Amino acid sequence: MSVIVAVIAGGPGAVSRLLAAEALRRAALDAGHDIAIEIGGDDGVRDPLAAARIAAASLAIEIGPQASGDPRFAGMRRYGATLDEVLADAGAVLRRALDSPPAGGRRIVAVTSCPTGIAHTFMAAEALLRAAAALGDEIRVETQGSVGAGTKLTGAEIAAADLVLIAADRQVDLARFAGKRVFHSGTKAAINDGKALIARALDEAEVQGGTVRPDSRAGAARARPGPYRHLMTGVSFMIPFVTAGGLLIALAFALGGIHATDAAAARSFAGALFEIGAKSAFTLFVPVLGGYIAYSIADRPGLAPGMIGGLLAALTGAGFLGAILAGFIGGYATRWLNETLRLPRGLQGLKPVLLLPVLGTLFTGLLMVYVIGRPVAELLHLMTHVLRSMQGSGALALGLLLGAMMAFDMGGPVNKAAYTFAVGLLSARVYTPMAAVMAAGMTPPLGVALATRLFASRFTTIERESGLPTAVLGLSFITEGAIPYAAEDPFRVIPCTMTGSAVAGAISMVADVKLRVPHGGVFVLPIPNAVTHLGLYVVAILAGSAVTALMLGLVKARLATPEG
C-alpha cells in the first residue's frame, strides 16, 4: 500500500475538479492505496492537506497547471497530470504516477524552437527550466531562435543526458541525438504545463535511430512531425526574406517617392533599394518557402526539388500557394524515393548527392510545369482580384475573421494559418490582410495589459506586475504575451481577446490600411511608406485593445481576497 497525496487546482470548472477527485479516489481505493486529495479553485480550497499527511506520503500527484511546483512537495516523488487525463482514465494516471521514477537526479537536454523564433521559443524554454527545477531534475535548454541557436548543447551534455526533449513547432535536426531517448512535442505543451510534459516524455520517449519501445508507439506516432510542422519550418526560413524585402521596398518609396519603380530611377539609390527588396528578396522568398518545406520532410536531398519547384511556382505565377504545394510534393516524393531505391553498399553515396535531388527535381518540376502551375496561378489571381476588390462588408468580414483567428490560439496553428496567409499575399502585392493580421496580433497582450490597470481587482499581484512586460510584447507584435492570462482563465480571456482582435482587424481592413512589413509591431510604423493611413491604423489597434480590456473587466470576477 502506498500513501498518496494529490492536489487538483485550476480556474473555472468546479464540477470537473470534483469529478476528477472522486475518480482518482476510487481508483486509489480499488488498488489498495491510501490517498488524500486537496481541491483548489476560485472559490477557495476544499479538504486542504495537513503537513503531517504530506510528510507521511510517498507520492504527490499534481493535477492542473496551477498545481505545478507546489513547494510543500519539495524532495518528494511527484507526478503531474492534466484534469482531462484524470477524467478520461484516473486508473491509468494513478498507475503512471506509481511507476514514475523518483524526482531528482535525472539529466535532461532540451531544444525549443518556433516558426518566428521569437516568443514561443523562449517561453517554452523558461517553462521547462521551471518545471525541471520543481521536479529536482537537471536540465539544459538550447533555444533555436531567430538569430540561431542560443546556449548551444555540447556533445558531453548530450552524451550524459537521460532524455532529449524537443519542444518545437518546426523541424529540428536530430542527427546529434542518435542513440538517445528522444521525445517530440510542440512549444505550447511546454508553456502550458512543463511538468506534465517532462513526465510524458520520460514515459513515451523513443530511441533516436533505434526501435520504438512497445508501450510508446502511440505516443511516438502522435509526436512525429506532420504537415503543419513542415509548413512552419518553411515559413520560419521565409520570414527573414519577407522582412528584409518589405523594409527595403518601404525605404525605396520613402526616398524616391512613387517613381522609385520607374525605369528612369533604376540607377538611383531608391531604385537600387527597390531592386534589392522587390526583385530579389521578394522573388527569393517563394522558392525558399518551398525548399524548406521539402527540407523538413526529406532532409537535404529534398532542398533542391522543393526550392526549384518553388521557383517554378514564382515563374508560372502560382506564387506562395504553388510553392507550398511544390514543397510538399518535392519533400514527400524525395523521401519516398529514398525509402524505395535500393543500391549496393558502394553506391549508397550517390543517393543524397545525385539520384534523389535529380529525380525529385524532375518529378516536382514536371508536375509544376504541366499540371499544377497554371491552375494554381489562376486560383491565386482570382483570390488576389477578390481581395483587392473587397470593400465595405467584404473587407469587414475578412477583417473580423483574420482578427479572430489571430487571437484564438495566440501563436498556435490557427494563428499561424492567418499569419501565413497574409505573408504569402505580400508577393502578390496585396498588403491589407498583413495590416489586419498585425493589428489583431498586437491587440491581445495590449488589451490584457490595459485590463490589469483598469480592473486591478480582477487580477492577482503577479498578473498585475506582469502587465507592463505583456504590453511591451504586444507593442512588438508578440501575441504570445497574453498566453499566461489565457491559460489561467481560458473561457473568459480567449473570447475577450478574440472580440478585441476581430474589431482591430475589421477597422484596419475597412480603412484600407496597407502594411508592407510582416513583423516588428509599432517599431516599423514610423518608417515612411511601411504602412498607409497610419492614424487610422493606430485607432484600430487602440480600439481593439480597449474592447478586450473592457470585456475582461465585465466578465472576470473580483478576487475573493484581493492580493497586494
Image (tube, helix red, strand yellow):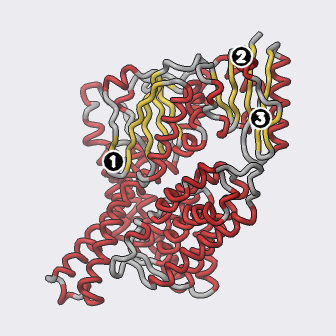
* Image depth: mark 2 or mark 3 in front: 2
Q: Nearer the viewer, residue 203 or 97?
A: 97
Q: Residue at x 62, y 75 (%)?
A: 503
Q: Residues within 10 Å of mark 3 (few under 14, many from 20)?
A: few
Q: Amino acid at mark 3?
A: Ala
Q: Residue at x 71, y 65 (%)?
A: 553
Residue at the left extreme, as displayed: 267
Q: Amino acid at mark 1?
A: Leu
Q: Residues within 10 Å of mark 2 (few under 14, many from 20)?
A: some
Q: In the image, is 268 to the left or to the right of 99?
A: left
Provide the secondary structure element on which disc 1 rests.
helix
Asked if labels 3 and 1 touch by Cβ distance under 8 angstroms, the answer is no
Mark positioned earlier in the residue sequence (1 or 3)? 3
Which residue was labeled with disc 2? 57
Q: Nearer the viewer, residue 466 or 209?
A: 466
CA gap, disc 1 and disc 3: 48 Å
State whether residue 312 is above or below residue 484. below
Asked if labels 3 and 2 touch by Cβ distance under 8 angstroms, the answer is no
Which residue was labeled with disc 1? 359
Provide the secondary structure element on which disc 3 rests.
helix
Q: Residues within 10 Å of mark 1 (few under 14, many from 20)?
A: some
